[in-house]
Image (cartoon, rainbow, N blue to C red):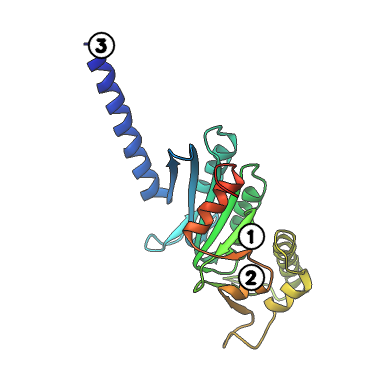
Amino acid sequence: MENNTTNIDKEREQKEKEELDDGKIREYGQTTLVNEQRKSKIHLLSIIGEIEGHECLPQHNKTTKYEHVLPQLAAIEDSSDIDGLLILINTVGGDVEAGLAIAEMIASLSKPTVSLVLGGSHSIGVPLAVSAQYSFIVPTATMIIHPVRMNGTVIGVSQTYDYFEKIQDRILNFVSSHSKIDKEELKSLMHNTKQLAKDVGSILIGKEAIEMGIIDEVGGIKEALNKLYQMAGRGEE
């Protein structure tokens, strides 16, 4: 009788865990990849759509909410079960402060981290892509580097332009310090006037991001996971 009760309790716990995992995927685009053979647990974080900041975007927009991501990153750092973090990125950019907050949080983790750019990593998505210890990009993915933009009323005084310059400098410093590209070279890509038809900036496709020193390697999910297993000491060198 006790064995039956124990089995029922285990089945109930397993069902609750599966429902919780399904809920995390639906609500936050997050789950934990458990590999029994390698005896490892990799947390999967997806950064998609637009990075939402202090103001809520319309419900029909696909968004990544920083108030969801930051606590989860803290939990990953504090967990003894999680061996590493895999970040899937397909974002059009978004709120600069929120994006930088997530990027700084990822960069400060002690756990092995790998990012994979799928589709696009535009604007503030660039710091997010390089915040991991190692980065991949698929051949068709794009990265768009451009100056900081602001919606709404802008006061046309010198202090406003100084403020914009400081924000851009923070982004340039972060990206150059977490990748192989020189700050001045990155700045020239940001202010390029030859690529974007109605704006300034640069579009890098796949291996171009590696050639510029922003991303480490061209690859997909297989390569990203294998690299993470190696970094976590769960795979072959």
In the rendered image, the vertical position of residue 229 relative to residue 218, given as above or below = above
Q: Quadrant of residue 21?
A: top left
Q: Does residue 148 appear in this view?
A: no
Residue at 61%, 86% (x, y): give it. 195
Q: Position of residue 87 (x, y in %)?
A: 53, 54
- 2 or 1: mark nearer the eye: 2
Q: Position of residue 129 (x, y in %)?
A: 59, 61
Q: Nearer the viewer, residue 161 or 184?
A: 184
Q: Position of residue 57 (x, y in %)?
A: 45, 60
Q: Does residue 59 appear in this view?
A: yes
Name which residue type carries label 1: Val
In the rendered image, the vertical position of residue 98 relative to residue 22, given as above or below = below
Q: CA distance from mark 1 to mark 3?
A: 53 Å
The numbered disc on residue 210 is: 2
Residue positioned most to the front: 236
- Local SS, label 1: helix
- 1 or 3: mark nearer the eye: 3
- Local packing at callout 2 (Cα closer than 10 Å; few below 14, some 14-19, many 20+) is many
Q: CA distance from mark 2 to mark 3?
A: 59 Å
Residue at 32%, 28% (x, y): give it. 13
- Local SS, label 2: helix
Give the quarter of the figure containing the N terminus.
top left
* Residue for badge 3: 2
Q: Quadrant of residue 207?
A: bottom right
Circle count: 3
